[in-house]
Amino acid sequence: MKIPDCFLTVKYVGARIPGVENQSDLKLGANCQVFAYELLRVNGLVAPKLRSSELWSDTQYTIKVSDFQPLDLMLYNSDNNAFGAHVGVYIGDGKIIHLSYQNQYAEIIDHIKMSDNEKYRVFIGAKRVLTPSSF
């Protein structure tokens, strides 16, 4: 998988949610979901523009997985609720890349270390996009 340089400099903007106008223009910023979905897109996968709880309950375009592979979507929260969950992308070797309000820019971190942050202490689970086609 590739992580273009622009993903390392995109600024967190909470109002840039899935489906926002010009979603692929990361110069305008992104929230965690837009960041993750755009990273998948540049790697040939088009995820549906779903919010966290919709993504977690989706069975048409994604599946839940426990054998993580690069480009799997990883969901974290302070509790077991998928509503408002934080989304990152698994990049391999136990690491994820994510964009958060707290960091303001992308961070590559060990998946297991996400639980050190109170806001992400519960790993909800992982989802894999089933098809590279558009939605």
Image: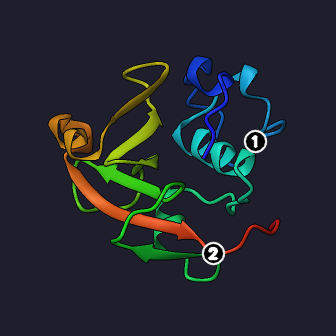
- Disc 1 target residue: 20
Instruction: First in sequence, mark 1 or 2: give its number.
Output: 1
Q: Quick check: 75 left or right of 32?
A: left
Determine whether 35 is above or below 71 in the image. Answer: above
Q: Indicate the quadrant containing the C terminus: top left, top right, bottom left or bottom right.
A: bottom right
Give the number of callouts.
Answer: 2
Determine whether 30 is above or below 104 in the image. Answer: below
Residue at image position (29%, 46%) is: 111
Q: Give the class, few, some or many, for how many residues have Cα within 10 Å of label 1's Cα (few <14, many ≥20).
A: few
Determine whether 88 is above or below 100 in the image. Answer: below
Give residue 61's quadrant in the image.
bottom right
- Disc 2 target residue: 130
Q: Quick check: 125 left or right of 10?
A: left
Residue at image position (29%, 49%) is: 77
Disc 2 on helix, strand or loop?
Answer: loop
Residue at image position (84%, 36%) is: 22
- The one nearer the camera, 66 or 23, is 66
The residue type indicated by label 1 comes to Val
- The one nearer the camera, 57 or 129, is 129
Disc 1 on helix, strand or loop?
Answer: loop
Residue 120 position, x and y percent, is 26, 43
CA distance for labels 1 and 2: 23 Å
Determine whether 27 is above or below 114 in the image. Answer: above
Residue 130 position, x and y percent, is 63, 75
Q: Quick check: 85 left or right of 94?
A: right
- The one nearer the camera, 99 or 89, is 89
The residue type indicated by label 2 comes to Leu
Residue farthest along the bottom direction in this orientation = 60
Residue 6 position, x and y percent, is 68, 23
